[in-house]
Amino acid sequence: MQENKNISAYRQQLRDRILDTAMHAFATQGIRAVKMDDIARQLGISKRTLYEIYDNKEDLLFEGVKKYKEIRERQIKDMLDGDHNVMDVILYAYRQKVETFRRTSPKFYSDLTKFPRVMSLQERDRHVNHERFLVFLERGVKEGFFRTDIDYRLVVRLFEAIGDYILNNQLYRIFSIEAIFKNIVFVSIRGFCTERGIKTIDAMIDCPPPTL
């Protein structure tokens, strides 16, 4: 029994190592540039061992995207469950997004569209994210940062359209992520802020790019 537990623990550790190694390679080199052979070689394992755990590269990418998405969601939830307000969360999400983009090749995002399972995962999450963002905005109203005379169902759709436009037109290849936030995201948020919220968001806009 103990031997089986050890095997299971080792396999789970190896699974995690594979995911972390693969996602780092995908992010820095682009997904299509990385072969399963490359991942196995970097980990010092056989390709057979790699394929025993993940059938193909898309399965590996799918699990990696899912894992890191769950980590980010848990971090945001922990902040919302703690003593942080919505503006704290916006600043935190901004810093995280900037750091992620700095470490990620634009090829990663353009390559991502070539993998149907991953795109399907993101599409399935759209409704859930829609509802979560609506609840988040309503919380901002209660905290006094967002105006009470706004239809936030429309605001959610606006931000979905903004996100789609940025990705579909690959604006991240033309402009820095800081410029995209400063000129598009923060300006849009500012439009439905109260005076208190405007002061907070302007401080974010004026602050230098974060260094994490």
Image: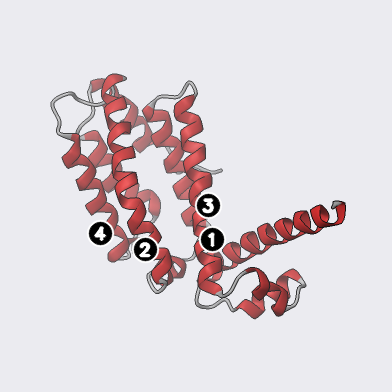
- The residue carrying mark 2 is 120
Q: How crowded is mark 3: few (under 14 residues within 10 Å), some or many (20 or more)?
A: some
Mark 1 and mark 3 lie on one chain; the one further toward the N terminus is: 1
Kind of residue at badge 4? Tyr
**Mark 2 and mark 1: span between their CA atoms?**
13 Å
Q: Which residue lies furthest to the front in this view?
A: 1
205 or 53, which is in the foreground? Answer: 53
Mark 2: secondary structure: helix
Q: Name the residue under label 1.
A: 63
Which is more foreground, mark 1 or mark 3?
1
Residue with the mark numbered 4 = 165
Q: Which residue shows up at 45% across the image and 70% down it?
A: 107
Q: Which residue is drawn at 86% across and 51% down?
A: 2
**Numbered tag placed on residue 130 in the rendering:** none
Colour mapping used in the image: secondary structure
Query: Pointer 3: what residue?
Result: 68
Q: How far apart are marks 3 and 4 (CA)?
A: 23 Å
Residue 193 rendering spot, x and y as whole percentages? 23, 28
The image position of residue 20, as x and y in percent, is 63, 59
Q: Earlier in the sequence, mark 3 or mark 4?
A: 3
